[in-house]
Image: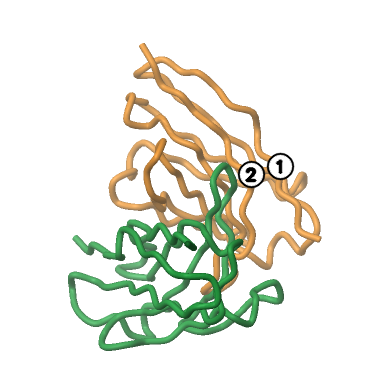
Amino acid sequence: QTVVTQEPSVTVSPGGTVTLTCASNTGAVTNAHYPGWLQQKPGQAPMSLIYSINDKHSWTPARFSGSLLGGKAALTLSGVVPEDEAEYYCLIYSGGGIIFGGGTKLTVL
Amino acid sequence: QVHLVQSGGELKKPGTSVKVSCKTSGYIFSNYALSWVRQAPGQGLEWMGWIATHNGNTNYARRFQGRITMTTDTSTRTAYMELRTLTTDDTAVYFCVVVAATSFDFWGPGTLITVSP
């Protein structure tokens, strides 16, 4: 059974840069997993930010970018603003379905 | 713009079934799949499966196979997710999601299903 792991919590200062990662217990995350990233704020539905490694939606702020880094999927926020404080979930396509990571609580402090 | 309206929250007894609806608008219905994702209180996201709206083909997550059915009504652009034999572990917010090829593009507001004796 595939398990996708994210950092449980990360803290970043306003204006800083932070990278969140997404690892699979079955091996490297690759482009074949089409990794994506979602943002969820308290009481709201998730919102897709990144799909297929680094494709952005029209609504995705430019400060968000995705990549593959050392066998993991990564989400980098450059120039963090207070409104980026949220839970971030990665997802991968695996075994014909979707697996979500456990989420990273990003605190902007 | 894409708009998803989900049915209201429900309180169910263990062993019963629930059917959640998701009415869509603002895009070509048959061009996108519809997925269902749930989130237990204070927990992460769990993919339940998806349905291809152009032909009704489904793909369910293994842990739900046998007690879940996803359907669509193309005439009303509405998707449905029925979950049977509920237990208290099924208490969660259930989201419908419009899915492009590799992107979970648009999320519904969620429907809270509470399962309690």
- Viewed as shown, does residue B67 lie left or right of B19? left
Residue B62 coordinates in the image, percent (x, y): 29, 51
- Viewed as shown, does residue B43 lie left or right of B37? left
In the rendered picture, chain A carries what hue? green
Query: Which amino acid does the dot numbered 1 rest on?
Result: Val
Chain with orange colouring: B
Q: Which chain carries label 2?
A: B
Residue B5's disc is 1
Q: Which of A30 and A84 is in front in this view?
A: A84
Residue A102 coordinates in the image, percent (x, y): 33, 56
Residue A109 coordinates in the image, percent (x, y): 47, 62
Q: Is mark 2 on a helix, strand or loop?
A: loop
**Residue at the spot of label 2:** B109
- Viewed as shown, does residue B115 lie left or right of A40? left
Q: Residues within 10 Å of mark 1 (few under 14, many from 20)?
A: some
Query: Which amino acid does the dot numbered 2 rest on?
Result: Pro
